[in-house]
Amino acid sequence: MAAAGPTLSRSGALCRRLLLTLSILAFACDACKQVILHVPSKLDAEKFVGRVNLEECFKSANIIHSSDPDFQILKDGSVYTTNAVLLSSETRSFTILLFNTDSQEEKEISVLLEEETQVQKRLSKEKPLRRAKRRWAPIPCSMLENSLGPFPLFLQQVQSDAAQNYTIYYSIRGPGVDQEPLHLFYVERDTGNLYCTRPVDREQYESFEITAFATTPDGYTPEYPLPLLIKVEDENDNAPIFTETTYTFTVFENCKVGSTVGQVCATDKDEPDTMHTRLRYSILEQLPSSPTLFSMHPATGVITTVSSQLDRELLDKYQLKIKVQDMDGQYFGLHTTATCIINIGDVNDNLPTFSPTSYVTSVEENTIDVEILRVTIEDKDLINTPNWRANYTILKGNENGNFKIVTDPRTNEGVLCVVKPLNYEETQQVTLQLGVVNEAPYSREASSRSAMSTATVTVNVKNQDEGPECNPPVQTVRIKENAPAGTRSSGYKAYDPDTRSSTGIRYRKVSDPKGWVTIDEDSGSIIVFRSLDREAEVISNGIYNVTVLASDKNGRTCTGILGIILEDINDNGPYIPKQTVVICKPTMSSAEIVAVDPDEPVNGPPFDFSLESSDSEVRRIWRLTKINDTAARLSYQNDPPFGSYAVPIRVSDRFGLSTVTSLNVILCNCITENDCTFRTSERTGNGEVKLGTWAILAILLGIALLFCVLFTLVCGISGTTKELKVLPDDLAQQNLIVSNTEAPGDDKVYSTNGFTTQAVGAAGQGICGTLGSGVRNGGQETIEMVKGHQTLDSCRGAGHHHTLDSCRGGHVEVDNCRYTYSEWHSFTQPRLGEESIRGHTLIKN
């Protein structure tokens, strides 16, 4: 089954078809393509008719022309009416001319308009006389959205090749048939004519994929189901819409030509990539209208400046009425409008200027932290921005730092203050030059105008009736120390700043730490009251400070400090400040001693050191050697014992004034001085040992552990003794002697009263019996029985002999090894056997 145009049932109809075809072919003999468009009998002006694929014929055409003035062809091949058209006959045709101006190449496309109702009437009357063999294949089919009918509107005819041999019934299924939207399409069962029942909106349904079926009356299906795609051709029924009704942009004043202001955007619901969605932007109106300052790119909607004369101070806002139109801006395209508000951003293109430029003010002398003047400026830039806020500075006249100017953030005024007191007697008038700039840098070229506005301020200083002035506040006088009481010297002087005289000023002490001086109330001179001592603790760098209060007759006062410089005299001998010296005898043979003199260096070193003692023993043990002007080396000789020694040393300054210092010298068996300090009592015999809490606890814990061990041994020995048999009385004095023949070891001596067993090589102790301490050296042992005494032989070094007394009055002799273990064994076994027969038992460990 395939698409097939209806055939004429009668010869007249066939003739008419042939004549129509011949006329079309004759009309399009030179055409590269023929197109048939089905249209209503009446077409309104600017109505979309259909679309022709121009690129299939000529891709590079830059001129498109219609031979019929009632129709126009756009670049994408869309055909529109320019005037209302009424088809008086069944068909109407015209030619599309395609021309390339560069290559001078020309092509033509023939367009045939066929009235839809006539097509339906013709198809309904036609009956096939003959059929050519056709294929059952998908059929391209389309319809115009929002079609005006008449409905049902014929779309296409489907036929099956099986109709030549069978009676075929046609049916369809899918969207628009038995699925939403229901009943939009139907097919005639017998003819296969496909119809649409009502208008379709392409923005809701772009296409329909339905399936056609061919069956025989008895249900046989000679063909596979045929998929049919019905595309809804777009009509320009949607105007483009801006994404916003009002756009707001900001551009800075004085910007360059071509600066981007912003971009607008619009959308169109019609079919993309067609003339219906090809948009063009434009500016319809600017308020205020003159001068023209902005332009809009027609394709992108970008707004740019066309002038550099934007001035926020003249006008800070512009309003544009903008338009977007589809059909590439053709006059018959649909369009909408929107509003664009452009705010002009401020830049610092106006300098602040003083108004007025000169000021006069006054201030009383000796006043500080007071506001004396406010200066104002004018600035046309935007208020409360860095372009408007002012920074004031004092350019000239403030070399002494008496003034400061700050900005009042609320009013933007400059506030001039006095921060350091002025003196009328020194300066009666000050002239200041002020400058002002903005917080933001000036945007224009520095050469166009001066970058700073200036103003002049004259400050008159008012005189005050001041009290006495203590100037300088610190004054000094020189007096020799140890000056006698009653010595008078010039003291502190204050004066009246107006008269520059000290007449009428009275003085008194405020502070005199040692009470060394008095002050004359009228003249301010000082009198020594007590002997002055330059080496006293309150003296710093040889200066004694006295605080003086000066007052006039009106009670106004000032305070100053009188520094008494005490001139040194040689009244102090040198001495040794470190009076305890430690000498670690194993590592040291001497110690260095250093002397100091409280007097000035002129009365001090070089020092002379000597032993100051009539005791010959001191001179026999100790010797002094000078190292430098202030130090000497104290050395011991004749190998004195450890202990503490008193060594008197006389130190004399360059003028012979001397003092004797008795040094406590400690000879100590130590490595470092600190070591000797911690163990002084142990080394010298005079110290006192002090144990800490943890040391005492450690000692107690050790004693407790020792008692535990002893208690365990007592318990073990007591249990063993109960199992031993009593030896005969004649062996009461016999003892088992263990000795080592190769090396010292732990040897055991057992008595008959308290006999214990213990492993060889371990130390043991008897309980109230004869027990000797064994010697261990890891070799063989020999045991010897001796009556009446105990002998312990072991190899320990070069044959040293030791005698240990037993608890029963016997003794143990430690001698060189005389027997090896094998010899002792061969000697004792037979005898041990005999003793066992006699009921005696020896236990060997």
Image (cartoon, grey):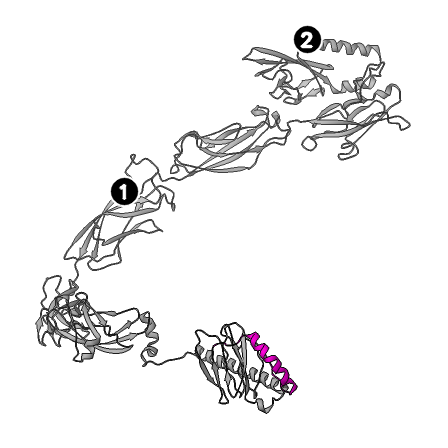
Q: Which of marks 2 and 1 is in front?
A: 2
Q: As displayed, is residue 717 above or below residue 409?
A: below
Quick one: quadrant of the N terminus? top right
Instruction: Give the residue type that dot 1 points to.
Output: Ser
Q: With 408 as the anchor, is 834 left or right in this view?
A: right
Residue at 33%, 72% (x, y): give it.
670
The secondary structure type at the circle numbered 1 is: strand
Residue holding disc 2: 29
Q: Is residue 831 magenta?
A: yes
Residue 132 rendering spot, x and y as whole percentages: 82, 15
Q: Residues in magenta?
A: 816-845
Residue holding disc 1: 453
Residue at 21%, 56% (x, y): give it.
363
Quick one: quadrant of the C terminus? bottom right
Residue at 60%, 90% (x, y): give it.
728
Q: As displayed, is residue 501 above or below residue 45?
A: below
Instruction: Give the residue type that dot 2 points to.
Output: Cys
Dot placed on the residue nearer the N-terminal end, 2 or 1: 2
Q: With 358 as the anchor, is 94 left or right in this view?
A: right
